[in-house]
Image (cartoon, rainbow, N blue to C red):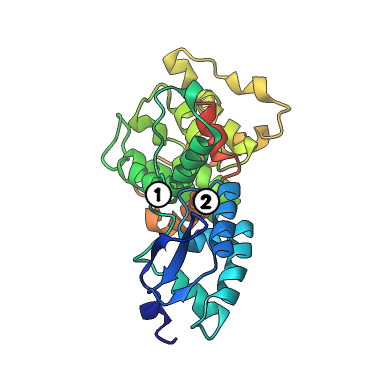
Amino acid sequence: MSNANEKNKDISLGETNDTGSHDYFVDSTYKKELQTLLLEKECMEKSQRFGLSRRGFLTTSFGAVAATSIFTQVSGFSSEAEALDGFTPPSEDLYQSMASATNFTRLDQSTSADWAIIENAVRAQQEGVVDTIKNMINACRGYHLGFGPDQYTHMTQAATRAKRDNASDEMILVCLVHDLGKVISNLAHPDIIAGIVRPYVSDGSYYILRHHMEYQWKHYGDYIFKPTNGRQRYVGESWHDDAVRFSDVYDQKAFDGNYPTDPLEEFMPLVEQFFGTKNPRTNLTHQICVG
């Protein structure tokens, strides 16, 4: 690549022109026409993605229109690729300086622009969910709750059994995370983990996690005054057979300290596959709004 980055690393607003607006200057040498600036402003307002970087903006459908003007009107570039690179250096981010947080004090005073900012921030936060899940699983190390193996070993062992049984990726994931809620509350752990994973898995997996303790009562309910036939109420549900298999073949057998259990690292590709997406099955902003 040529020295376009150096020539164009300083992009700032120039002096007010006779139209009352500002022109952009690229290193005070290559001036973009006013209509380009106005077009970018219009595109940005339409997209309502105030937290986007310039590169992110230019890859949107609205930004692409502005990009076309930039490539054709800014001299000094030998190719469109070079123009894009020169216009979007990491050190000088046009849209990064725009509003990144709201300032309303009541929800009933918020605006659509505020929620565009919030949605953008939530989608950025989404990139850390994989690490959050990994940290939660690791937090179960040494967490026995009276059982022989700790909860980390129990969950990875259930996932290992499912993997060796050629279960689906989603079933393996369900096994891997099914008791994560215990780090918060043992009594409420099915509802906790079901709520955490709901945007990322099928409805069937959500219901398996939500009701998995009732399915397990078949094996020990008599000892804790719980119905051993609690699972019967779900017979006929599309996910019932999978819930039975999860409970009887994977979960309830995963307390063997001598079983050769795979480490968490073996399952991280699955964690990234399901939790790493920036666009979960359920819209993230909707999740905020109903929260």
Dot 2 corresponds to which residue? 278
Q: How far apart are the alpha carbons under marks 2 and 1?
A: 10 Å
Image location (x, y in percent) of residue 261? 40, 53
Q: In this orientation, which residue lies closer to the viewer: 29 or 279?
A: 29
Q: Which residue is drawn at 48% across and 24% down?
A: 109
Secondary structure beneath label 1: helix
Q: Do the residues labelled 2 and 1 touch (CB within 8 Å)?
A: no
Q: In this orientation, which residue lies closer to the viewer: 35 or 2?
A: 35
Q: Is residue 60 left or right of residue 22?
A: right
Kindly tell me whether residue 88 is visible in this rendering: no
Q: In this orientation, which residue lies closer to the viewer: 5 or 256?
A: 5
In the rendered image, the residue lying farthest to the left is 142
Q: Which residue is drawn at 61% across and 51% down?
A: 168
Dot 1 corresponds to which residue? 128
Secondary structure beneath label 2: loop
Q: What residue type is labelled 2?
A: Lys
